[in-house]
Image (spheres, rainbow, N blue to C red):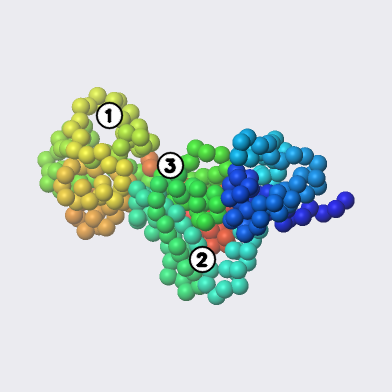
């Protein structure tokens, strides 16, 4: 049996992603007729038509969709291998980390501490929204994504690497003269996570159990901004103490009360790889992930 021609497969993949023979030919620097001949050769080799024509568009047949899934996996693995082996031959290795823009900087620092400051390691840290970071992770542009919420899509592996308690934190003046959780929650404005977050859902369940009506000063999806608002005395913040570790150590802010039943999980999200980054194993291992 003749072996598969990977040039044909590469050309097919380009046409499949472009959806148009002329544009794909221009990107590959080929004549459309030559590219069409390459696609026909692959179809003959596989024994199946790979495209249906709809006007000027080329639509994948069922066989074409199967072929594209395998082609993407083949070329993705090849690109991953080249990147990994290229870096393995260098004196300095690279760890590419994505972090949700709203995530605690102190938590990110704690996760990366095993590799920070090492002369043989460069850390590339990129922040952004969840969808953007997961796309980069899926395309192997990132080794790991740090987030407070596990992703909902298939194909990702969420490692629960930490679980922090949640407290009521604020400036001493806002806490003076108030004892007990109910009095502290109702005695000052509150800085809360946004309603979409899992942490806010847990807090609302606590509020209902206590039967309290609260004054909300701000709803914030960024832990760094919650930290700043708490420092400004805008209100008492509901957040993990790790977010304001330095302010608690200096006495600028006080941890008034641990909120019962509330925990903030942190996840390191990865994708299965045939050539995993050894540095990723190091930081995950230090975080307790086997």
Q: Which mark is nearer the camera, 2 or 1?
A: 2
Label 3 or label 2, whichever lies nearer to me, is 2
Could you tell me how far apart the alpha carbons at marks 3 and 2 are, in whole angstroms?
25 Å
Q: Nearer the viewer, mark 3 or mark 1?
A: 3
Query: What residue is rendered at 68% in x and 36% in y?
Result: 52
Disc 1 designates what residue?
207
Q: Residue at coordinates 59% horizontally, 63% vertically from top-left? A: 83
Q: Which residue is mark 2?
A: 94
Q: Residue furthest right?
A: 1
Relative to 24, is 195 above or below?
A: above
For the residue carrying disc 3, how many other residues have a C-alpha within 10 Å: few (<14), some (14-19), or many (20+)? some
- C-alpha gap between disc 3 and disc 1: 22 Å
Task: Judge by depth and name the residue closer to the eye, 16 or 4.
Answer: 16
Neighbours of disc 1 within 10 Å: few (<14), some (14-19), many (20+): some
Q: Earlier in the sequence, mark 3 or mark 2?
A: 2
Specify whether 178 is left or right of 97.
Answer: left
Tag 1's secondary structure?
A: helix
Q: Position of residue 252 (x, y in %)?
A: 18, 54
Q: Where on the picture, by quarter, is residue 278? A: bottom right
Calculate the distance from the C-alpha at mark 2 to the C-alpha at mark 1.
45 Å
Q: Nearer the viewer, residue 9 or 92?
A: 9
Give the label on residue 149, or none: 3
> Of residues 2 and 241, which is closer to you in this image?
2
Residue plotted at (49% across, 47% down): 134
| Residue sitting nearer the eye, 224 or 74 | 74
Please tell me the numbered disc located at residue 159.
none
Instruction: Determine the residue positioned at 72% across, 57% down.
Output: 7
């Amino acid at each position: 049996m003749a072996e598969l021609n990977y040039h044909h497969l590469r050309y097919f993949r380009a046409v499949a992603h472009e959806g148009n023979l002329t544009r794909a030919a221009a990107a590959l620097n080929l004549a459309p007729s030559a590219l069409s001949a390459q696609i026909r050769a692959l179809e003959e080799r596989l024994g199946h038509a790979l495209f249906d024509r709809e006007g000027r568009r080329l639509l994948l047949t069922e066989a074409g969709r199967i072929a594209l899934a395998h082609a993407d996996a083949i070329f993705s693995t090849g690109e991953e291998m080249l990147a990994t082996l290229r870096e393995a031959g260098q004196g300095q290795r690279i760890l590419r980390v994505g972090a949700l823009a709203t995530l605690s900087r102190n938590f990110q620092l704690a996760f990366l501490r095993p590799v920070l400051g090492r002369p043989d390691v460069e850390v590339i840290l990129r922040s952004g929204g969840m969808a953007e970071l997961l796309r980069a992770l899926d395309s192997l542009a990132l080794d790991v994504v740090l987030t407070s919420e596990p992703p909902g899509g298939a194909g990702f592996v969420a490692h629960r690497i930490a679980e922090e308690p949640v407290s009521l934190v604020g400036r001493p003046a806002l806490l003076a003269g108030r004892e007990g959780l109910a009095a502290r929650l109702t005695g000052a404005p509150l800085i809360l996570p946004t309603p979409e977050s899992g942490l806010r859902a847990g807090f609302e369940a606590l509020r209902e159990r206590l039967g309290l009506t609260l004054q909300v000063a701000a709803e914030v999806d960024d832990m760094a901004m919650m930290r700043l608002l708490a420092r400004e005395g805008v209100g008492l913040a509901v957040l993990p103490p790790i977010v304001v570790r330095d302010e608690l150590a200096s006495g600028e802010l006080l941890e008034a009360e641990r909120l019962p039943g509330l925990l903030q999980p942190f996840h390191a999200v990865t994708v299965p790889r045939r050539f995993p980054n050894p540095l990723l194993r190091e930081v995950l291992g230090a975080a307790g992930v086997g």
